Amino acid sequence: MSKKVEKLAGWRFKAWDETEWMPAEVPGCVHTDLVRNGLIPDPFYETNEKNLQWIDKKDWEYETVFDAPAGFLEESRQELVFEGLDTYAEVIVNGRKILSADNMFRLWQTEVTGLLKPQGNSLLVRFRSPIKEDLPKLERLGYALPAANDQSELGGLGDKKISVFARKAPYHYGWDWGPRFVTSGIWRDAWLTAWSDCRITDLFIRQDKVTAETAWLTAVVTVEAERAAQGTLRLSAVGRTWEQSVAVEAGFTRLELPLVLDRPALWWCRGLGEATLHAFRAELELAGGAASEKSVRTGLRSVRLVRERDEAGASFFIELNGKPVFAKGANHIPNDSFLPSVTDERYRHEIATAAASNMNMLRVWGGGVYEDDLFYELCDENGILVWQDFMFACSMYPGDAAFLENVKAEAEDNLVRLRNHPCLALWCGNNEMDSAWAHFKENAGWGWKQPFSQAQRDKIWNDYEAVFHRILPEAVERLMPGMAYWPSSPLFELTGDMRQHATGMAGGGDIHYWGVWHGKEPFEDYNRKIGRFMSEYGFQSFPEWSSVQRYAEDKDMELESEVMLAHQKNGRGNTLIKEYMDEYLPVPKDFPSFLYASQVLQADAMAMAIEAHRRSKPYCMGTLYWQINDCWPVASWSSMDYYGKWKAIQYHAKRSFRDVMVSAEETDGLVRFTAVNDLPVEFRGRLTVRLIDFSGRCLKEENVEIQVAGGGTAPVLLADRGEWLGDADPAQTVLAASLAAEDGALIHTTEHYFARTKALALQKPDLRVEVSATADGKGARLTLTTDTLAKQVWLTAEADGIFSDNYFDLLPGVPHTVEFLARPEGSVAFLPAEPGAVTVRSMADFVHLPAQEGSVRG
């Protein structure tokens, strides 16, 4: 049997070279402890980041004193467990060194039997500076490995990029959306455990074959025992019990118990069914009375990556329980630069946002961390599939024996920890490294390999292959048999020659398309540059005015101020936003208006991309934009800002990710309306398309009865621009489409304009709002009307929350009703709530209309 102490408390910390101890929090890190003790200012405020780079050059230590819990020392075995040590640490108990750690991502546990006393045990954890630890490794290697996002100069290291040597979150060293804060600390829980006789250390429900008729499973039970013994293993789940006689050896024994379930309730992602979860409980009883138990929760499903040859190349999509899944979602980065600051509520807010936005997949990107258990539990519960990267990104890594062994142990720890989560759909080796190095194609890639000699190139590539083509796939197959492994994102196919690298819109694999943004290509290129699975693409915007005010002063409110540039980590980011805005939108009136316009610009771009990808189904079977969240307040590609506020893109994504929707695209004078159905059943309904002038007059109308097969798309209307417009002014008319189900329920509305927004003849609308109570009486319904087209209507509320719709175009004569929603603490659902005071504005409030003159830039 075993006992677990929740966690060790009463911590304090100091720098090695100082004498004064200060209160500390565990989980925590040095930076947050310094803030709590008033020794440094808010690292995220103004330009404080650059003045806090001294912290990672110092060594730090944490200590606590604890008493052994009652009955603890009566057990024959005691262990100390650290779920996360960041990163280079020595652990000393009662004066004896018991552990050396060198990997932030690993579980560190060590036996302390015989070291503990009833009272006054001392525990000291000494952290060595990751900078001082790794600079000598660079010197010994003799050349610098590529590390594109390592902000070494900001860190006072010049061109010495050392992030690749530490098994530590890469983004801590900076990224093109994140600051450089190289942390140290006990970043996850620390606790004691004690046991005697035997214990179950792991329970894995291996899903050998799962169909709608039968689930063939194996309960894989790992037992640690002090002696060899006979006994009984019992497994309980879904109202049934299985048991068998077993023998365990002294040490570790692996036991397997076959399970068969008829007509299992399957786990489905959002849109395809219920995310049903089942609890499994294993009990071990040994002769002599020793006993142990362990429970896990999982969902029953078959999941595979389908890559089959076709006329266009090879497919790339997730199949769940035999059904193709069109993946809709975003890339996820860590929610904070200081990971222990991420509360459970922030995880709930993110997953609630994904679910409310009609997403069914998040990609845990490889420059962050293997996420907290709660993140995956919430994805399990809400039917959100997870594309999981291993933690390698945009760099080339060393390949010495110690590094490779460390990586192997890291992979095993995290595969074992996460493998029961049904949300996991794919493990990916790394982010962008295959295409950036482009080993088999001399003039491809990011120019990384050119400075190296041929011998160095071969060494670096051999080290790469050791990790991503051998160690990681072997670990996945051994510990999660049947789970898909993809070596690098993006990748065309693992061929071992120049066909391997994802270049252009290859006919297979996954694609990161950055022609829009980095390549300064027009938004319209989203309509034609489409791959089989779009795992990255994006466009930046600023947080809203109320968020910017939290990290900047009034004097900083201009685009090129020192603070705005400090909170923009992508070199030309602010300039690119302005240049694209000049192409697509009217001129903003002032800096707050520029912030609003940047969000509208981003939302327009992402909606165009998402809908282009969905129209291209089944050629394209996934669209994951970059990125859903931020790790600090910043101008970035995120769809909700650091404070959890939804940007315009989040609302546009919610509409464009609807399970059933209609999308319009104009090419060569023809507007093509395509209906998309991600549901597993056929959709029947009616499409109504009207040509409306901005005053609300209907100039032409057409109704079409439509049907779209389950999981399919269908062209539903082809509108000739010339025939529909006639003599109407394209700058003052819009094609308004509405899709209704057979019972008349409105499913989706969209608008198609014949000119870019900057060329539209917008006028100041008379926006009116009628407020009524929601059906449950707990919230507010707002019905909006206008006398002329109101572009990108933006509602803000006094209370924290979201609206059921926002940043929408309001047509004259077409009332639009929205509800205010808030997420109760502990919930992963937005529910009707009271908004307090509500402000309603539209684009006309933020830009110079055509009749106005002037140009104000931030």
Image: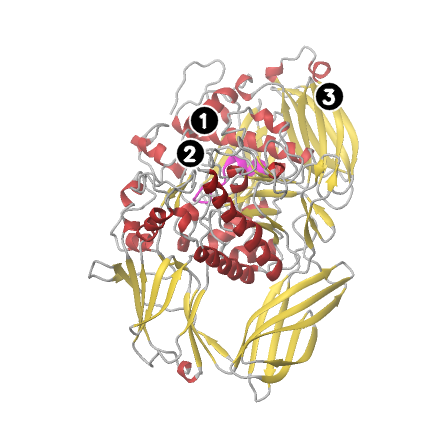
| Residues at circles 3 and 2 in contact by the CB criterion of under 8 Å | no
Per the image, the residue denoted by label 3 is 719
Task: Using the image, tell me which numbered label, if any, was put on residue 43.
Answer: none
Per the image, the residue denoted by label 2 is 570
Visible residue check, residue 149: yes
The residue under the point 43% across, 13% down is 853
* Residue 828 versus residue 672 in the image, above or below: below
> What amino acid is found at the position of numbered circle 1 in the picture?
Leu
Q: Residues within 10 Å of mark 3 (few under 14, many from 20)?
A: some
Residue 491 magenta: no
**Dot 2 or dot 1, earlier in sequence:** 2
The residue under the point 69% across, 33% down is 615
* Magenta-tinted stretch: 640-653
**Dot 3 or dot 2, earlier in sequence:** 2
> What amino acid is found at the position of numbered circle 3 in the picture?
Ala
Give the CA distance from mark 1 to mark 3.
Answer: 34 Å
Give the CA distance from mark 2 to mark 1.
Answer: 10 Å
Q: Is residue 402 left or right of residue 525?
A: left
Label 3 vs label 2, nearer the camera: 2
| Residues at circles 2 and 1 in contact by the CB criterion of under 8 Å | yes
Provide residue 171's location: percent of width, then percent of height. Answer: 42, 46
Residue in front for this viewpoint, 499 or 591: 499
Per the image, the residue denoted by label 1 is 576
Give the CA distance from mark 3 to mark 2.
Answer: 41 Å
Provide residue 553's location: percent of width, then percent of height. Answer: 31, 35
> What amino acid is found at the position of numbered circle 2 in the picture?
Asn
**Picture quadrant where residue 444 is located:** top right
Residue in front for this viewpoint, 212 or 95: 95
